Image (cartoon, grey):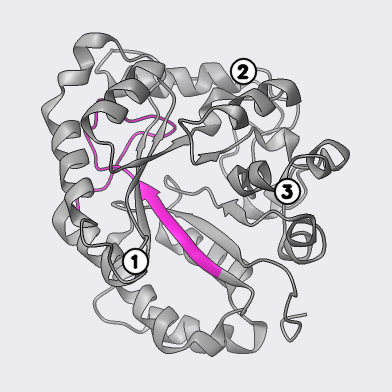
Amino acid sequence: MEKIKSPYKTAFYHLPGLFEFYEFYRIFLPLFREHREWFYDWCDIGSIYGAPEGCLWGGGRTGSGNADAKSVFSLMKEYGISARLTFSNSLLQKEHLNDKKCNELCALLANAYKDGGVQGECRGGVIVYSPLLVEYLKINFPELYLVSSTTKVLTGFDDFCSELDCTDFKYVVPDFRLNKRFEDLENLSPFKKDKVEFLCNECCSFECKARKACYENVSRKNLGEDVSEHKCSAPDGDKGYSFARAMKNPGFIGIQDIQQKYLPMGFSNFKIEGRGLGSAMVFEFLLYYMTKSEYQIELREAVYLDSMLDLF
């Protein structure tokens, strides 16, 4: 399969751990550039997303990275990759918009791409939920593009289409339960298809009814509220993430799906989750989604034997 070159669009992956896995990407990205033959020629890296610890605007997951923001953004610019801040807190109020740390991060990100970077059009983005934050960012940081967060849990196709109609967003990440609505997806216009960013490897139960409550729990934590952990009542909800289990999820998008279904249909953006899983698991995602099977040993050795990196 890896010897087949797709006649369709390039698949752009949006990868997790901008701050969380900075040290990993500092090793991986030079390998991706220097040994491009190791990787499928039909895919590329569109962005890397995340947030440092202690971000009031954060959502989806509580940030855990502590890498220096200037170093992080500089690395992304060097390799022509868009950096995205995950500021998808759903519970922001007007007074939260003055948060110093989050404003400084947005300012640094906006300035990081001022000359366009390697790719010319490359720039920073923000993944958002709150309408308040959308309006604030449009006024104060117009250089940053906006992504509608999957934390909105857009499970209704009409709601999803309405989000695609919104001119504020460059990309929209639907709930993973819309991933296989092929009859409806096929009928989207080419412009709308370019805005869709599918979440590929979600492990959450397809039948989960409390996904929005789970995300709201994270938002409250990032606001500093003293809340207990959300207890998932979905099947296998207490077992944590498993890539093997994610592959059995009805919404899972694998590389054959991307090559044989999504790219021919005109879709090109695919999000990989994993900010809270550790760099070793994220590396497995990159091996599966991006790396030709005959070169996986070379890539593993190059990464694992690097004395500067501790994946575990």
CA gap, disc 2 to disc 3?
19 Å
Crowding near the residue tagged with mark 3, few <14, some 14–19, many ≥20 C-alpha atoms within 10 Å: many
Residue corresponding to mark 2: 210
Name the residue type under label 3: Phe
Q: Is residue 157 left or right of residue 106?
A: right
Specify which label sits upstream in the sequence, 2 or 1: 1
Specify which label sits upstream in the sequence, 1 or 3: 1
Residue 35 image offset from top left, x and y in percent: 46, 89
Q: Is residue 259 left or right of residue 303?
A: right
Q: Quadrant of the C terminus?
A: bottom left
Q: Which mark is residue 120?
A: 1
Residue corresponding to mark 3: 252
Name the residue type under label 2: Ala
Residue 46 image offset from top left, x and y in percent: 47, 60
- Give the residue displayed 54% in from the left and 59% down from the top: 13
**Snapshot quadrant of residue 223:** top left
Disc 1, disc 3: CB below 8 Å? no
Crowding near the residue tagged with mark 1, few <14, some 14–19, many ≥20 C-alpha atoms within 10 Å: few
The answer to if 183 sits in the magenta stretch is: no
Q: Is residue 287 left or right of residue 251?
A: left
Specify which label sits upstream in the sequence, 2 or 3: 2
Front disc: 2 or 1: 1
* Range drawn in magenta: 44-67
Q: Nearer the viewer, residue 48 or 164?
A: 164
